[in-house]
Image (cartoon, helix red, strand yellow):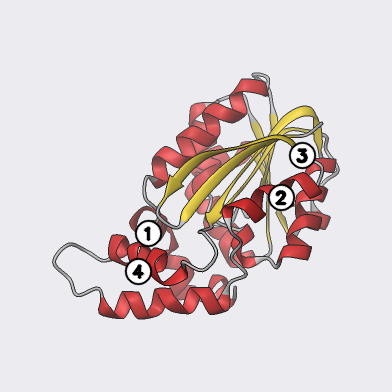
Amino acid sequence: MSSFTDAQAVANYASRPAQQVPGFHDLQRMAAILLAERAPDNAEILVLGAGGGLELKSFAQRHPNWRFTGVDPSAEMLALARQTLGPLAARATLVKGYIDTAPPGPFDGATCILTLHFVPRAERVNTLAELRRRLKSGALLIIAHHSFPAGQAESWLNRYADFATPDGADPTKARAGAQAIAQKLPILSPEDEMAALAEAGFTEIAQFYQGFTFRGWVATAP
């Protein structure tokens, strides 16, 4: 995750998710709709992997009485989040660190979007369990990141690269870069993703989103 401390990469971050993640803005909207099913009007929401602030801003604009705790290991990305939020930053507490740095809550909901695919499975289950421990009973967790069927990395990652390539451009270089993802990231199959959520203690686990290599799940803290 060293790119999230590189000044140029941080500066360019805001434009990348919409280019690389099919339906990125709709994914944020869906996450807000799901959270609002259980969260009160004055909800406290935990956002793990909050650097950049795109998710925080989307939620804050849709729910003017929600308050947020955003956690991210990159000081540079948290600075970008403050910039992205602008005057909305008054409703967000930004914390440098990982899930064990987050306040105990309990929170009315939580998200972890485009983050967990960086985390190995055993550590991922622990992260999910720590998220669950910080949620009120019945609160929802929303996660979304890279996940595709086992043994199908090449075909799915080529589709991801083709989507991220501007129309009319040669996707060859993008495809080569995308294939490196399979070696660099501990990507789980959709079945294993749901198993990890169950191991962490979540219930009512369901997939709500898919965009080529990206999938999203909603799960309930018991």
**Extreme-left residue of the structure:** 168
Q: Residues within 10 Å of mark 1 (few under 14, many from 20)?
A: some
Relative to 140, residue 177 above or below = below
Where residue 87 appears, as percent x and y from the top left, is: 52, 39
Q: Which residue is drawn at 22% across and 64% down?
A: 166
Specify the amino acid type for callout 4.
Asn
What residue is pinned by disc 3?
A: 202
**In this rendering, which labeled residue sits more in front, label 1 or label 2?**
2
Where residue 17 appears, as percent x and y from the top left, is: 42, 56
Specify the amino acid type for callout 3.
Phe
What residue is pinned by disc 1?
A: 20
Q: Residues within 10 Å of mark 4 (few under 14, many from 20)?
A: many
Mark 4 or 2 closer to N-term? Answer: 4
Relative to 86, residue 169 above or below = below
**In this rendering, which labeled residue sits more in front, label 4 or label 1?**
4
Relative to 91, residue 81 above or below = below
- Identify the secondary structure beneath mark 2: helix
- Identify the secondary structure beneath mark 1: helix
Mark 3 or 1 closer to N-term? Answer: 1
Report, in whole angstroms, how far the alpha carbon at label 4 lies from the one at label 3. 32 Å
Q: Residue at x 67, y 22 (%)?
A: 38
What residue is pinned by disc 4?
A: 158
What residue is pinned by disc 2?
A: 195
Q: Is residue 75 left or right of residue 81?
A: right
Report, in whole angstroms, how far the alpha carbon at label 3 lies from the one at label 2. 10 Å
Where residue 220 appears, as percent x and y from the top left, is: 72, 33
